[in-house]
């Protein structure tokens, strides 16, 4: 007889573990299959958390050069990369063990091994020693996430041509790091190594970096990162990459001309693809997009196979941990008979470079394309008292509102700790609030979030107080 559960989740990343934790809270008997030795998925093991740990460490290292302005002399500052990586690994270890603890407390069975769907209500788990067991469950959730993709004809070698996973653990600082792809992963990891001393060159196929973000702010981002030492080659199509004796040669067509770039490492950050291989999708008859590999689901995360659901990076939408988590939690509630849904119009995204770029809602480009009448309210951090005291005055808050109703349609922040400030705009959007709502909200003084209030005044009343 196979082991029986109410709910079997394949994949223990943010989507899968959030679904498991919430379902257990709601009294559902849950098991989660995970083939990695630790829970937490890409996010905790080789994604969000280790990258943010290194961004923080490298930011502090780079900040030393700025401290002289505060009257603090930091001569003889020295990098101990080994220690920096150890700190990062310790954070990962603690957080992944934290999820294992929560599983234990919630009486969630962690089934180590690779899960494979057999059909409605049935799956197998193949452990590391090759032993396969059958598991039965009323509901099965596919949450196998995504993995780095490369360009045709360019394979990762794990040493010189690497993915983000290896770029989180370089044993020494590369002298010259070439980053292929100007999305958030390339810019974040490019920033880490540039701050630690690499000469970083970013090659981007499109004519701009961060193509889904507000264009005005991404121009500012590019200028800022250029000042920090990153070199950008836009409109540049990588044709081939070869590695020999620890050196890589990247051949590209840049603005129509042949160019060659040389370095000691290439980070391929051209995107991620869903993990469907070996999951039994075809055998079980689960419909997925042949081109993107994304599993097709409806608003309740149901696939076309009865009792089989999918969430997170495996399905459509932004490949972000908080989106996966919200889907996991929401699905658990739906399975328990609650009414719950994710508001896809209010999913924030953050690029943890410095200053940070955080956004929610629509960009100016999207509003123009939709021919929607809108107002813009902006406020620079240069005029914000707290930013002055922090010595972090670069950037701006930009709000986009409906021209007639003043409803907040988009918020874009390039500035210090934008990642934290965006939460206020997300909450206002969740409540269908307006710029006036933000303008009439009392913000503590002096805080960075006053800049949001000021941008809201600019949008709602036509002028900020302090600009
Ligand atoms: C460098 C980097 C930085 C990132 N930074 C951020 C960030 O700052 N903020 C953010 O929101 N997002 C970030 N992301 C994206 C984020 O990590 C993903 O969106 C998120 O992890 C997706 O969650 P998921 O649960 O869908 O999948 P995953 O986290 O990929 O988890 C899926 C899990 O399923 C397991 N699995 C796969 N197949 C099987 C199988 N057959 N059987 C058993 N187990 C299986 C995998 O081992 C994995 O552990 C980052 C990603 C990277 C690479």
Image (tube, rainbow, N blue to C red):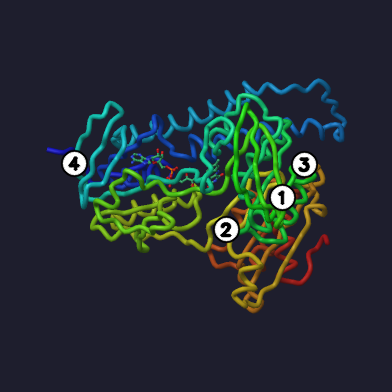
Dot 4 surroundings within 10 Å: few (below 14), some, or many (20 or more)? some
Q: CA distance from mark 3 to mark 4?
A: 56 Å
- Given residues 349 and 249, the one toward you in this image is 249
Q: Secondary structure at mark 1?
A: strand
- Using the numbered discs, state the Cα–Cα distance from disc 4 to disc 2 in whole angstroms: 40 Å
Q: Look at mark 4 in the image and give the residue it sits on.
A: 4
In this picture, residue 227 sits left or right of residue 406 = right
Q: Which residue is nearer to you in this view: 432 or 75?
A: 75
Say which residue label 2 marks: 426
Q: Residue furthest left?
A: 1
Where is residue 453 shown, x and y percent of the image? Answer: 71, 60
Upstream in the sequence, badge 1 or badge 4?
Answer: 4
> On the rendered structure, is 211 left or right of 344?
right
Q: CA distance from mark 3 to mark 2?
A: 30 Å
> Can you give x and y, in whole percent of width and height, for residue 225 in the image?
74, 46
In the rendered image, residue 247, in percent from the top left (x then y), is placed at 65, 31
Q: CA distance from mark 1 to mark 4?
A: 55 Å
Name the quadrant containing residue 84. top right
| Location of residue 206 with respect to 89 vertically, above or below | below
Label annotation for residue 233: 1
Q: Earlier in the sequence, mark 4 or mark 2?
A: 4
Location of residue 85 with respect to 449 vertically, above or below: above
Residue drawn at point x = 85 percent, y = 26 percent: 73
């Amino acid at each position: 007889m196979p082991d029986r559960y109410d709910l079997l989740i394949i994949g223990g990343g943010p989507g899968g573990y959030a679904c498991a934790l919430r379902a257990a809270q709601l009294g559902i008997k849950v098991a989660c299959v995970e083939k990695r030795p630790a829970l937490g998925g890409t996010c905790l093991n080789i994604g969000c958390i280790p990258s943010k740990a290194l961004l923080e460490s490298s930011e502090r290292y780079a900040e030393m050069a700025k401290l002289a302005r505060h009257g603090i002399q930091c001569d003889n500052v020295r990098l101990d990369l080994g220690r920096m990586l150890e700190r990062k690994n310790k954070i990962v270890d603690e957080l992944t063990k934290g999820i294992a603890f929560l599983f234990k407390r919630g009486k969630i069975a962690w089934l180590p091994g690779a899960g494979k769907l057999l059909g409605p209500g049935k799956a197998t788990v193949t452990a590391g020693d090759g032993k396969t067991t059958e598991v039965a469950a009323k509901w099965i959730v596919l949450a196998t996430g995504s993995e780095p993709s490369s360009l045709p004809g360019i394979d990762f070698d794990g040493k010189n041509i690497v993915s983000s996973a290896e770029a989180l653990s370089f044993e020494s600082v590369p002298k010259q790091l070439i980053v292929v792809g100007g999305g958030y992963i390339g810019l974040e990891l490019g920033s880490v190594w540039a701050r630690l001393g690499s000469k970083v060159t970013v090659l981007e196929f499109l004519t701009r970096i961060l193509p889904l973000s507000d264009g005005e702010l991404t121009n500012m981002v590019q200028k800022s990162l250029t000042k920090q030492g990153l070199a950008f080659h836009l409109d540049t199509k990588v044709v081939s990459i070869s590695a020999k004796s620890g050196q890589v040669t990247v051949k590209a067509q840049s603005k129509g001309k042949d160019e060659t770039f040389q370095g000691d490492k290439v980070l391929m950050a051209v995107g991620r693809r869903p993990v469907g291989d070996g999951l039994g999708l075809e055998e079980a008859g689960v419909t997925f997009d042949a081109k993107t590999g994304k599993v097709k689901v409806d608003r309740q995360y149901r696939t076309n196979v009865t009792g089989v659901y999918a969430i997170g990076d495996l399905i459509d939408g932004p490949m972000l941990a908080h989106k996966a988590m919200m889907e996991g939690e929401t699905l658990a509630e739906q399975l328990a008979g609650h009414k719950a849904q994710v508001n896809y119009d209010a999913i924030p995204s953050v690029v943890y470079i410095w200053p940070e770029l955080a956004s929610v809602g629509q960009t100016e480009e999207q509003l123009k394309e939709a021919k929607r009448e809108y107002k813009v309210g902006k406020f620079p951090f240069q005029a914000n008292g707290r930013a002055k005291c922090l010595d972090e005055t670069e950037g701006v808050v930009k709000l986009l509102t409906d021209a007639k109703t003043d409803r907040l349609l988009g918020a874009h922040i390039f500035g210090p700790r934008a990642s934290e400030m965006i939460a206020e705009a997300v909450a206002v959007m969740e409540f269908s609030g307006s710029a006036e709502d933000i303008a009439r909200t009392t913000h503590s003084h002096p805080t960075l979030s006053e800049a949001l209030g000021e941008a809201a005044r600019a949008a709602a009343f036509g002028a900020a107080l302090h600009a």
